[in-house]
Image (cartoon, rainbow, N blue to C red):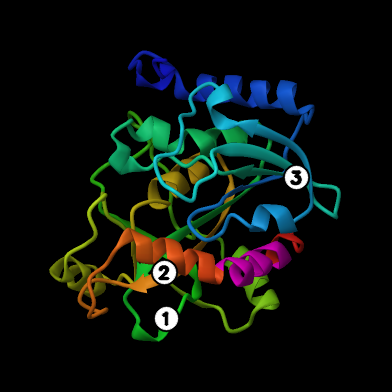
Amino acid sequence: MVNPLNDAQANPFEIAKQAAQQIAEISGIEKHDIALTLGSGWAKAADLIGETVSVIPATEIIGFSKPAVHGHVGTLRSVKLPSGKMALVIGARTHYYENHGVRAVVHSVRTAAATGAKVMILTNGAGGIKPEWAGGAAVLISDHINLTANSPLEGATFIDLTDLYSKRLRALAREVDPKLDEGVYVQFRGPHYETPAEVQMAKIMGGHIVGMSTALEAIAAREAGMEILGMSLITNLAAGIQTTPLSHEEVIQAGKDAEGRISELLSKIVAKL
């Protein structure tokens, strides 16, 4: 099936609105209050934050495609939180390196906004530049550097990215775990891992975390008026910081090893929203 987002004449916000309407019709949930994109290692949080009311295969919703990465469940889940609020849990992330276009990358975020969500939680598995983060640390994202040379904004759309990753939400997260560290996330294009020289470049530029997602989604979330919390699971130290070769198998295993701990952490943060 041809993705309507690939039509240059299509309005991506209208398609997101259609997607939100489909989610409402299938799930029976008229409005969601918060949304979470659960990256590598974070999926178990969906079982911990509340009562699942609806699970929809993402491919049944306009604009969504099957995830290309192992560890992404490919569903859109509506969860009722203990507070009574509704959360939309996105397990269908499209990465920039899949070459479906930036509209497809941020479609889930725009759809979440169209469902009514005012808070967007973006999580990922990433490489760490700080040696003390070895062993599966969960880290707050304080800012980002976008090295994709692209943007989800189209035309003369000027959006302020000051405090893109909410200070309020980071402070709330530290109420749950005062030891949470934070750093600047650097989005590379991927899918290849960064070279040691590229990691050193990121470090010199002020980066602490390297990965292949999140930054473009955060920009779209800000455009939609959402408040954003970003969190990374440091699945490995970045190339040149870590002395052994990198592998996707290592990333998946690190996610499995940390899944219970970081998912519980995230569920406690969500409970405060």
The kind of secondary structure element at disc 3 is strand
Does the magenta-highlighted stretch encompass residue 118?
A: no
Q: Give the side of residue 29 with respect to residue 263, left or right.
A: right
For discs 3 and 2, the disc positioned in front in the rendered view: 2
Residue at 34 percent across and 84 percent down: it is 131
Residue underneath mark 2? 235
Which label's residue is closer to the chain start, 3 or 2?
3
Q: Is residue 5 above or below residue 134?
A: above
Q: Main secondary structure of the magenta part?
A: helix
Kindly identify which numbered label has been placed on residue 79.
Answer: 3
**Tag 3–tag 1 contact (CB < 8 Å):** no
Which label's residue is closer to the chain start, 3 or 1?
3
Residue underneath mark 1? 133
The kind of secondary structure element at disc 1 is helix
Residue 168 location (% of width, % of height)? 63, 65
The kind of secondary structure element at disc 2 is strand
Residue 25 shows in this picture: yes
Q: Is residue 199 above or below residue 191?
A: below
For discs 2 and 1, the disc positioned in front in the rendered view: 2
Q: Is residue 114 above or below residue 176?
A: above
Which amino acid type is marked by label 1? Answer: Trp
User: Which residues make up the magenta segment?
Assistant: 259-268
